[in-house]
Image (cartoon, rainbow, N blue to C red):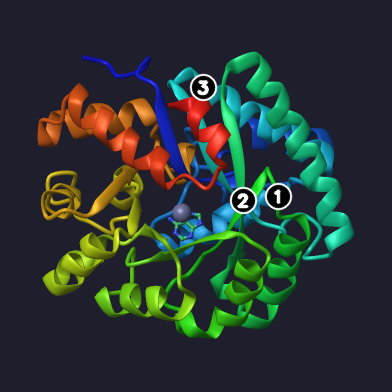
C-alpha cells in the first residue's frame, strides 16, 4: 500500500536541504555560477560521508543569493511536501546562509519565505512554521547573532530555535547562551543530538540547552536508562530514518532503533531531514516503516498525533490541523 495521501505532520526538514538538484542547477545557470563536486553523473547530490554531505550542502546553498531565491525555494519545497500528504511542516531556517546573521538582512529573507508559505497554505493546503537554526561547526560565537535573529523575529511564524551541523564539534553547553536567548524570547527549543554523538551527548543537550525535542536522538538506544528517562520526561525525538540509513548513522533500515525506542515508550516522530539528498519523501519513509516494521494506518495515526502534539505552533493552528 502507498501512503501518499495520508495526512502527515513533519517536524524536521532543513529548507536548503530540501532543494531539488534541478532547482539548484537552474539557479546556478541563471547566475552563471559553477557547481564543482556537488552532483554525480546522474545529477544527484554526491557525497561519501557526513562531512562531505555538509560540504556539498553548503556548496549547493551558496547558489541561493537573494530573498527572491529563497521565496522560490520555499514555494517549490512546500509544493513537493504537499504532494506527499504533508499538511504541516517545521522547517529549519539558517540565517547564517541568509544575510550572515545580520538581523535586517534576515528580515528580508524571512519576509520572502513567509510570502511563499502563505501562498502554499492557500494553494496546496500545507502549513509551515520556521525553526531558526544555528550551525554547530560555525562555533558558539557565530551562534549568538543567529539567536538574536531568532529572538527579534519570534512570533506566529518563527516558533522555535535549534542547532544543526557537525555534532562532534564542541559540547552542547558551549551553545547555552544562544539557547537561553531564544528561550527568553519565547521560542520553543530543539537540538540535533545522538545522530553521531552517544547517549552522553543526548543527556548533556537536554541538561544544558533545556530542549523539549531532540533531532535524531537515535544513539540514546545505547543507554536504556536514558531511553527510560526520555520516555518519562516526554522528550520527543524527530527521527529521520531514511537520512540515518543514507548517511550511514545506522547500517540498514532493519537495524534502525526507532521500533525499540517506540516500544519502550519514547515519543517518536517521522521526518525526511533533507529529502533529495537522501532520495526520500514522507511517503517513502512511511512505506519503508510499513515494510520493515509492519507499521499500519493505526501506527501512523498515533505517530501523527504525537507529532502534532509536539509541534511548535500555537493552539488554534494545532486545532485546525487535528
Ligand atoms: N543539516 C542538514 N542535515 C543535517 C543532519 N542530518 N545532521 C546535522 N546537520 C544537518
Ligand atoms: Zn536535521
Q: Nearer the viewer, residue 91 or 285?
A: 91
Q: Secondary structure at mark 1?
A: loop
Image-quadrant location for residue 208: bottom left
Residue identifier under label 3: 82
285 relative to 87 in the view: left or right: left
**Disc 2 secondary structure class:** strand
Is residue 271 visible from the viewing direction of this image?
Answer: no
Give the answer, above or below, for where 130 lies relative to 25: below
Marks 3 and 2 in Cβ contact (< 8 Å): no
Taking the spot 34% from the left edge, 47% from the top edge, the residue there is 240
Provide the residue designation for mark 1. Answer: 155
* Residue farthest to the right, as pictured: 104
Residue at 74% x, 38% y is 113
Residue 230 location (% of width, % of height)? 25, 64
Measuring from the top left, give residue 10's x and y in whole percent: 44, 38
Question: If the image is split into quadrants, where does the N terminus sit?
Answer: top left
| Residue 112 locus on image (x, y percent) | 80, 38
On residue 159, the disc is: 2
Give yes or no for contact between labels 2 and 1 (Cβ–Cβ under 8 Å). yes
Q: Measured from the top left, where is residue 56 in percent x and y? A: 56, 54
Q: Residue at x 55, y 72 (%)?
A: 136
Q: Is residue 214 above or below residue 42?
A: below
Q: CA distance from mark 3 to mark 2?
A: 21 Å
Q: How many marks?
A: 3
What residue sits 39% from the left and 73% below the top? 206
Amino acid at each position: 500500500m502507498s501512503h501518499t495521501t495520508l495526512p502527515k505532520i513533519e517536524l524536521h526538514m532543513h529548507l536548503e536541504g530540501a532543494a531539488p538538484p534541478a532547482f539548484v542547477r537552474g539557479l546556478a545557470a541563471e547566475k552563471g555560477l559553477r557547481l564543482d563536486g556537488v552532483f554525480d553523473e546522474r545529477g544527484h547530490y554526491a557525497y561519501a560521508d557526513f562531512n562531505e554531505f555538509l560540504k556539498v550542502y553548503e556548496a549547493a546553498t551558496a547558489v541561493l543569493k537573494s530573498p527572491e531565491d529563497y521565496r522560490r525555494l520555499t514555494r517549490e519545497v512546500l509544493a513537493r511536501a504537499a504532494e506527499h500528504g504533508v499538511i504541516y511542516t517545521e522547517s529549519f531556517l539558517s540565517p547564517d546562509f541568509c544575510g550572515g546573521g545580520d538581523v535586517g538582512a534576515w528580515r528580508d529573507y524571512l519576509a520572502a519565505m513567509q510570502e511563499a508559505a502563505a501562498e502554499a497554505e492557500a494553494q496546496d493546503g500545507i502549513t509551515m512554521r520556521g525553526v531558526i537554526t544555528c550551525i554547530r561547526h560555525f562555533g558558539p560565537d557565530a551562534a549568538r547573532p543567529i539567536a538574536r535573529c531568532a529572538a527579534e523575529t519570534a512570533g506566529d511564524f518563527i516558533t522555535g530555535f535549534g542547532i544543526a551541523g557537525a555534532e562532534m564539534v564542541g559540547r552542547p553547553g558551549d551553545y547555552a547562551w544562544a539557547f537561553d536567548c531564544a528561550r527568553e524570547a519565547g521560542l520553543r527549543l530543539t537540538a540535533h543530538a545522538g545522530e553521531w554523538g552517544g547517549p552522553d551527548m543526548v543527556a548533556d543537550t537536554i541538561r544544558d540547552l533545556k530542549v523539549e525535542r531532540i533531532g535524531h536522538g537515535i544513539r540514546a538506544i545505547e543507554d536504556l536508562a536514558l531511553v527510560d528517562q526520555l520516555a518519562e520526561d516526554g522528550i520527543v525525538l524527530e527521527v529521520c530514518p531514511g537520512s540515518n540509513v543514507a548517511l550511514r548513522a545506522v547500517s540498514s533500515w532493519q537495524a534502525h532503533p526507532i521500533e525499540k525506542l517506540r516500544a519502550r515508550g519514547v515519543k517518536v516522530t517521522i521526518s525526511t531531514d533533507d529529502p533529495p539528498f537522501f532520495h526520500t519523501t514522507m511517503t517513502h519513509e512511511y512505506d519503508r516503516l510499513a515494510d520493515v516494521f509492519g507499521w499500519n494506518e493505526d501506527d501512523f495515526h498515533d505517530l501523527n498525533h504525537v507529532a502534532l502534539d509536539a509541534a511548535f505552533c500555537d493552539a488554534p493552528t494545532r486545532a485546525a490541523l487535528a
